[in-house]
Image (cartoon, helix red, strand yellow):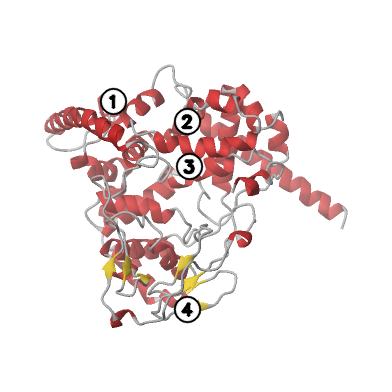
Amino acid sequence: MLTALANLKNKGKKMRRIPSSTSSTGSFTTYSSTRSKHSGNTNSNNSMKWDWTIEENAYGHSNLDQLSTPPFHQKEKHASETPLKSTLETTERDMYGFKKPVQWIKLQHLNQFEHRYQSVLLRQNEKWIQLMADHNDQFPPVNSRVKRYVRKGIPHLYRGKAWMHYSGAKSKMEAHPGLYQSLLASALAMESQNEFADVIRRDLHRTFPDNTQFACAHTDQDGNVTMDPESNPKLVSLKHILYAFSVHSPQIGYCQSLNYLVGIFLLFTASEEEAFWLLVCMVHDYCPLSMYDLTMEGSNIDQVVLMMMVYERMPSIWNKLANGKCFWECEQLDAMPPITLVTNHWFLTAFINIMPIETVLRIWDCFFIEGYQVLFKVALTIIKMNEHGIWALDDPIDVFPLLQNMPRKLMDCHRFMERIFSPSGIAADLTPQEIDRKRNLFKDRRKQRRQARFKHFVLNS
């Protein structure tokens, strides 16, 4: 991977959306049809096949050179011929069904943290019970007390309901009774005509496959593995929500990472409808315009904004990331440092699969109350925490494994959140207004460059 990424150092291409998995390890044929987006062929049988899917990353490079022959041969049998059993092994798991990150943190240290963290959870639970009692069991308006409590974590008992309330999802759902069911019915009726349906189905079994609540891998008596998303109610709900959203927001349709957002929503909501409205609010009310559409312009601009903040707040880090180039030179050439390939993924997934799940949930608590600026605060804090490590690198490309691996070790979510919101933190003074000013600046500059290129084309044609 790093060899491929090294080739990107001087390429100024912007991110573009590939609305399917970017895994380079192949995929299994599922009970729903699986299509290679390059060949256009569709397989709809129920037999187990090893289906290598050639994928492109956001810079247009494929994984073709990484593909090899299947590691084992599978007999083609109908699933009903032999009994199936789950392939999910027994291992250390958290309360949400995720594997504990023992590959990054020793189990002993994880257990020690969880023991200490229990006292934090108990205190927060008591405070929230009192907070709700003080407001007749209704969520109060956002004020300094609510913000302080949220930064210390919303208890599991209230988390999903708090997200629904403060995001506005509950109000939207109540204002549009029956709309979700209508959208879902339309999506199911037009499934064969929906250009996103096949890609959505293909991504179902790739959504948290190691989580007990989303697993759908089964093994028959001969050891043949079959992926059956339809056997898992959570994955069926995931499909329904993504189908309905593709009809609700056709300008977006579907983009990989939306499946992960919905997956988390399903762990904390009481119904598909609630998870659907949380997705609508997150994409349309919190995230920038065109973040998940085919252009991904909103996502690209936010990476320029992030890099400008690094340039202004951590100039020595910028010099290392940009290999000594000036920020404005990179911006003019649309050539941000390759590390934005990593940081862009942070934003698109809101740090899902980037950090331990409890840390992600603490970030989301603040996100739904304080807004999208929280993602910038988190990203800048992570970069700041790696300052000395980045300084020590001989080659700026080596920052990739550093910024990919370090966040996975941030198990102490309580201390991490305190660092993000510390008055002396790297992003303590960051405001939504500053983000908007920078976004508008770079939107205008891009527009001017496009107009200049068009004028040059016309004059020389």
Nearest the eye: 235 or 293 = 235
Nearest the eye: 267 or 276 = 267
In this figure, which residue is indicated by the disc labeled 4? 43
Q: CA distance from mark 1 to mark 2?
A: 21 Å
Residue 172's spot in the image, x, y percent?
Answer: 31, 51
User: Residue 169, can we see it?
Assistant: yes
Q: Is residue 44 above or below residue 255?
A: below
The answer to which quarter of the image holds residue 106 is: top left
Q: Earlier in the sequence, mark 4 or mark 2?
A: 4
Q: Nearer the viewer, mark 1 or mark 4?
A: 4
Q: Which amino acid type is marked by label 4?
A: Asn
Mark 1 surroundings within 10 Å by alpha-carbon count, few (fewer than 14), some (14 through 19), many (20 or more): few
In this figure, which residue is indicated by the disc labeled 2? 382
Q: Which amino acid type is marked by label 3?
A: Trp
For this view, does 128 lie left or right of residue 232?
left
Residue 58: which numbered mark, if any?
none
Q: Earlier in the sequence, mark 3 or mark 4?
A: 4
Residue 148: which numbered mark, if any?
1
In this figure, which residue is indicated by the disc labeled 3? 346
Q: SS at mark 3?
A: helix
Q: SS at mark 1?
A: helix
Q: Is residue 6 above or below residue 125?
A: below
Q: SS at mark 2?
A: helix
> Residue at 44% of width from left, 72% of height from top?
29
Q: Earlier in the sequence, mark 3 or mark 2?
A: 3
- Is the residue under label 2 in contact with that under label 3 (CB below 8 Å)? yes
Q: CA distance from mark 3 to mark 4?
A: 33 Å
For this view, does 438 lie left or right of residue 201?
right
Q: Nearer the viewer, mark 3 or mark 1?
A: 3
